[in-house]
Image (cartoon, coloured by chain):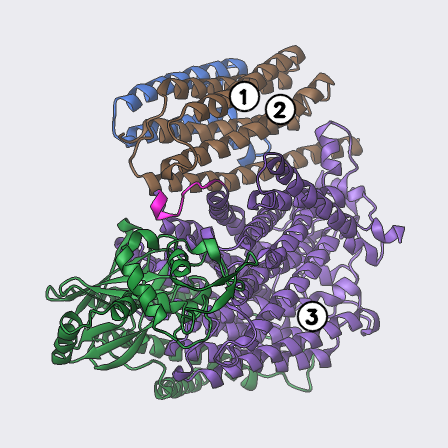
Amino acid sequence: MSSINNTIESYQQKLAISRLGLWLFFASDAFMFGGLLVTRFYLLGNKNLNLDQTLGLLVTSILLISSFFMNRAEVMVSEGNHKGFITSLVITILLGISFLVGVVGLEWGSAHFGPGDGAEGAVFYMMTGMHAFHVLTGIIFLSLVLRNGLNKKYTPEKHYAVEASANYWHFVDVVWIIYYPVLYLMGTI
Amino acid sequence: MKHFSIVSILVILLTVIVYVFLQAVGLLPTQASSQAVIIDQLFDIHIGIISFLFSLIVVFIGYSFIVFRRNKLLPDEEGQHITGSSKLEIVWTLVPLAVVIFISYLGAISLAETRKIDPQALEVKVTGGQWFWSFDYPDYGITSDVLNLPVDRQVKLSLTSVDVIHSFWVPEFRVKQDVLPGENLVKELRFTPIETGDFMVLCAELCGGAHAYMNSPVKVVTEGEFQDWVDEELGNFPQDPESLGERLAKNNGCFGCHSLDGKDGVGPTWRGLYGSEKTLVSGEKIMVDDEYLYEAIVNPNSQIVLGFPANVMAQNYGDLFTDEEIKNMIAFIKSLD
Amino acid sequence: MTKLSPLKRGVVIFIILGVLTAIEYYLGISDVPSILLWAIALIKMLLVLQFFMHINRVINPKKGGHE
Amino acid sequence: MKNFMSTGIVKGILYQIVGSFIGAGLLGGIRALMGLSWKTEPAIVLGGLVGAIAFMVGVGAFKDWWKMAVGDDVTEASEVAGEQGFRRYFGFSLDHKVIGIQYGILSMVLLVLGGSLALIFRVELAQSGLQLLNFVQFNTLVGLHGMVLIASILMGIAAMSNYVVPLLIGAEDMAFPRLNAFSFWIAVPASIILMSSLFFGGFETGWTAYPPLSVRGPMGIQMFFLGVFFVGWSSILGALNLIVTILTMRTKGMGLFKMPIFAWSVLATSIISLTATQLIGLSFQLVMFERLLEMSFFTPSGGGNPILFQHLFWFYSHPAVYIFVLPGLGIISELLPVFVRKPLFGYKWVAMSSMGIALTGFLVWGHHMFTAGIEEYLRVPFMYSTLLVAVPTGVKFFSWVATIWQGKARFPVPMLFVLGGIIVFLLGGLTGPPGGTVSTDLHLHDTYYIVGHFHNTMFGGFIFPIFAAIYYWYPKITGRRMSETLGKVHFYLMTPSFFLMTFGQMRIGLLGMRRRIADYDPAMGFDFTQLLITIGGYLIAISILVFFYNLIVSAKKGEPATGNVWNSRSPEWDILPSPAPAHNYAGIHFNVVGEPYDYGLKGSKYVELAQNVGQRKENDE
């Protein structure tokens, strides 16, 4: 009896430790993203970058929807709905990839400046690039979760990996929630 | 209580000793500007506080070690079980807090006084570059590599850099201001020299290479002497090509890298340069003539002499100088043999 | 909000976020003061932190998930 | 031979070399195919990056993580046997004590390297004129001296925290043992890359790397950036680990205010490292990108602003000073009660003062920029916040003095270094305020006075305390004591030499000696003082040689340590044998039953052995 209790307790404790570690990582990473925000306002002030608004709204919506499906995936795995979990996860990954295509493929290609064109170019490419790098790593994590999910490694009781990568994905979404108005909407042209 | 009275007396004694000692040592250079006088008053306050706090901590620790030392006969003797006192802690949080705020207030006043504006100030535009200082007097149309200043008149410097960050500092004036590149980052510095004499402006911000040698003379003279200097610069300056070339070279800081005494610096010396034979980085041997010198000024990287680094000299002298000016400079180099 | 099943709660939060984004977009292209955009972004951020990332799980580790 | 080649560090370095060539070759090759010059900066940078990752692969840092990622089971860290003997210090180990020693070794290696760099340029400065070095060499040495020693200090702090904190709070290991090993090992290729900047032309900027100078100079600056970047990650991840460990893994009954005080200072330090370090990483990354991709963040001609760099840079680099000194001050608070046999005066206030220093530390970076041409309205607020740091620091000093007052002091070597630390840090603290008020700083900024002030804080806040810590915990690590005589030689040689050096620095600084100049005008009359400073520096170096001799010889020939060597109340001395066993308190859990520093209170105890795991459980139910 004691040994079973012991494992549950230690899994619970591990869970608490891992969650705290993950959140501290977010806190740390947030400072880096915050530094880029400061860079944007310090160099450009209240200047609008005059980007393609339709494309901006499109990629923002894509990321938001992907966050929604990520949430569904996590809820479903904790409810034991394996099929739903896999479906939602696949949708999330596909939306993540389309976000990358939207920003790196379309926005970078169509922007009216390059990375070497003054402070606007530098700030824009750095901010979107750094965020895109995080999206890319998020997609990699989610793909690993998908692979393990297909191998039925997760149970409603034990699926911390799903929770962690979901939280990472939401964190990347939170960053974009701030970056979207800052890059596209704020300021005057 | 007896202990505290003795300690208090010792603290006061040591404070006085330390303070007098520090004052007697002569910690700071001469005060040659009115700002230096203001700033040194704040230094005095700091020195007083330093003397007191140093004595306070050191006397308490030393006294305790000597007077309350362990009894040799009781090797395992323990100290008294005192875990703390909130009252004391609050006192030594709040008192320093008050002192700190007061010092900051004095600091703010001191800063404001050093920045007092005199509308009659003499304007000088200062340009820093790797590795020279150049001083423009827009009121007189003079450019010089020596900062000439009349005594007892405030001077307003507008500082800018052509390449990296430098810093304008004259220790005797106490004030310092970084010199930044960029048209929108021109910085201002004001001070009033109160003593005639020769000083040095030093570059205080690491600017690569010959940073250590980025010094220029500062001459503080009487109003009359200053006027004489202005007249001389404006009127009686010889107009032959060699002198014009020398003046151009001097004002653009060429001598920071190219010496006139025959010793190579960051760049080759100009003494005896004309007509000599040099080996280039490419291995090719060339004769230093008018054509080579022209190319070396306009496009310095094209023919680097062996043993000297590339990319050091600015690339834009071709745009900066007229052909006439470059010819004058070559004439000047020619005259150095 | 806590009474809803987790799946439904996700839908509700998503709809709120979507509406906020739409408002944000219209405010953004019509040149309003930035402070409004900051406010909306902040609300969106807090919603995601609370309902998608379950920030209270880290503060109170006994709660939520993996029961 | 085969044995040697399979040692973690050797394998790692080999992988790094190969990785660097592959990385540089890849980009260089593509460029060569395009008919461009292949030996370029981007290729070298990519080489450095790939090399560091290859090192981590070689040392085996990713093995278990990869298994976890693909869903395979991995052995619990507490059940990994690990290598035994001396070899374990050179391979991938998950034991926090081994990692602590590894950090210590790396820290000492870097200390020697960084110190030697200073010894070289001190010779140049001993008299006016240029004798030994040219400008770029001098600037490179000055910059590397700074950054290598910063890395050394970070490693030294990590060594102390890693070894001691889990022992103090009764944890079996750190919260994330694999991450812990990763944070240590990433610092090894980082140090190699950092040093390699010497071979890529050096750099001219000093450790602060201000653009636009850093945007133009030689390529060595990129290696400098890359090295610092990885050291930064080591620091961030290590801090993350320590925070989680301290918050979640304390033994039964140990509330936050019953922790040994050192844990508090580590917690405060880790909060800064976790967050602020990102900003130096970012600022260096932006300059890297500006060099590689011509993104103009900091060059005014392209629309950038060099002041921005200074804001980002000092947002880390000022709090970094508190990262360096807080653990040292924690060591002082931790050891002082043991040697004066009195409780730490005002435990809660001391603990909170660490937090206070850490938090105010975030608000003061602007005082490095009083002369830089920052926005006018910022200078006065930054002056207020800067001087505010004096308040929590004062609380620490007054508490130490109150702890010492009427104590029955003993003076073994660790106590000597604690006292040295207090006095030297006092000087460092007192020489700070003149640099904190704006108008006096206009004179002091970028002078040797600042250099003297800074060395005072670093020696008082780190060098003296870490020596105290090594002398103090050495028996716990090796089971033998270090020689007291040699320790005293070390102390009585180092302390006066240090005063000679630092007073000399401050003296000429006030009179007009600038920082980071290879040569000075003999007319200023600094030659004699400069010579004294150099002599002081060399004497310190000799005293440290004595220390190393003591350190190495005592491991084999020192007097065996039995029982509670210092008669301390803290659990690692009270409960554990020396040397500390592999899994700390495994099987012999302890409970906290009293206050940590109740010296002088008869019959009180801080910790008590719990019977065993099973019985403890039954008692709970």
Colour of chain C, in one word, is: blue
Give the residue type at disc 2: Leu
Give the residue type at disc 3: Tyr
Tag 3, which chain? D
Disc 2 element? helix
- Residue shown at the point (64%, 69%) measured from the top left: D467
Tag 2, which chain? A
Q: Which residues are magenta?
A: D293-302
What is the letter of the brown chain? Answer: A
Q: Which mark is residue A96?
A: 1
Disc 3 element? helix
Residue A157 sits above or below residue D535 on the image = above
Q: Which residue is mark 3?
A: D471
* Apparent side of residue B21 relative to residue A91 in the rendered image (left or right): left
- Residue shown at the point (51%, 70%) measured from the top left: D455
Mark 1 surroundings: few (<14), some (14-19) or many (≥20) residues within 10 A: many
What is the letter of the purple chain? Answer: D
| x and y, in percent, of residue C55 in the image | 51, 31
- Residue shown at the point (52%, 58%) measured from the top left: D203
Mark 2 surroundings: few (<14), some (14-19) or many (≥20) residues within 10 A: many
- Mark-to-mark CA distance, 1 and 3: 55 Å
* Residue D583 appears in the picture as rendered: no
Tag 1, which chain? A
Check chain identity for marks 2 and 3: say if they share one. no
Q: Which residue is mark 2?
A: A142
